[in-house]
Image (cartoon, rainbow, N blue to C red):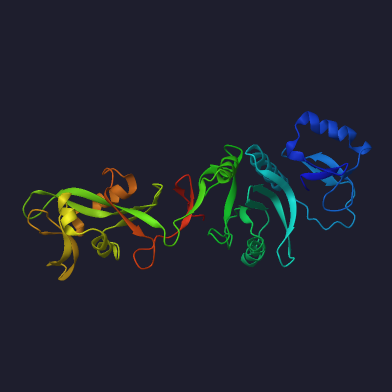
Amino acid sequence: MPLRARLNDEDIYSYEFNEKLWNELKASYKNQTLMMPCCDNKAIPKVSKLNNYFFAHARKGQCTSAPETFEHIFLKTRIAQIAYSLGWNVITEKIGETPEGDCWIADVFCTKGKTKIAFEIQWSPQTESEFKRRQEKYNRSGVRTAWLYKLRHNQEYFPTGHEIPAFGIQYEKDSDEMYVPQFNQTIDDFVHGMLIGKLKWRPHEGEELVGKLITHVQQCWRCKRNTRVILGVGFYDRDGTELELAGFQNDGIPEFILQQINNSALAKNGIGSIKSRYHKSMAEAYISNGCRHCDAIQGASYYFDAWVEYAYTGSWGEPMMEFLFQNSQETLHIESKWYFEQESSRQIR
């Protein structure tokens, strides 16, 4: 059930009509040539149960185009309307092909300058292999893709990565709206934000990132004087998006900090040195915080609660001592995710 038809050999789009114009078309189309774009059959203007305008076959005949749900029509209409309002060139049910001649049909195809985006609404279940097969066609055609996929309970597969950029959709009864739970955005706000550049995959391999030490002032168990210890590191991109938090006791973090900042720089900021110290109770040596006054080891138990409180509430103030590093396996690798307005994608269950 497309949003596009041919009226007297000119493409028309149902999402561009208001109620008055649609009623005029319904009253006059029999006296004109209104055809479906998928075949040579005549078209009929209709209204869906969700109050969206669309075109249907006057007689199905041998047309192989698949039927669409009313939710599918609703989403196609909203995407097309939003893209059109933002100055994109919009074609629904766009037929294209790869350089090798493999055909694809995009629900909503948007272009602006050299940028090409195909929106695919996947309301019926789809296997991983089928996602990959269809996505590969767009990749070979140089078309960016956004899959809007109906979330189901206990579904076996849902793509959430960069190779298949899919975003789940659920219906919220309280607000009577469709929304994207990965970012807690309504479908309208999500599509609008995507088309103006708010959706980004970050960080990239080799990208220069910012590390910021997270510290806490506590009383040294030995000399009873206040000292500043390192709780962990916050990782950010150059736009200020928080990518990840890592506690000081996480594997490899103390060594990473020593690679980036020396103890002389720490001392200038009132932070005790970090180095290998022997812990009597644990009967082993490990890289630890030390008191800036007496160099006594400051064990993890002394600031564990402080780290937990910071990680969940940020109540210990702004991170300090920034440094730059390259996101790579050789230094430290931050996992890439989808971000929308600097908020990372939530896990879908």
Residue 69 visible to an observer of this rendering = no
Q: Camera-side residue: 158 or 140?
A: 140
Q: Toward which corner of the image does residue 87 lie, by quadrant?
A: top right
Q: Residue at x 17, y 58 (%)?
A: 263
Q: Is residue 287 above or below residue 342?
A: below
> Residue, x 35% and y 63% (percent of image)?
332
Question: Is residue 55 at all visible to an observer of this figure?
Answer: yes
Which quadrant holds residue 295?
bottom left
Q: Is residue 19 left or right of residue 140?
A: right
Q: Residue furthest right?
A: 31
Q: Does 16 sit above or below residue 244?
A: above
Q: Is residue 232 left or right of residue 90?
A: left
The x, y position of residue 131, in whole percent, is 63, 62
x and y percentages locating residue 236 in the rendered image:
37, 51
x, y percent for residue 213:
27, 52
Residue 178 location, quadrant: top right
Which one is in front, 80 or 167?
A: 80
Q: Residue furthest bottom?
A: 284
Q: Residue furthest front?
A: 113
**Residue at image coords 64%, 52%:** 116
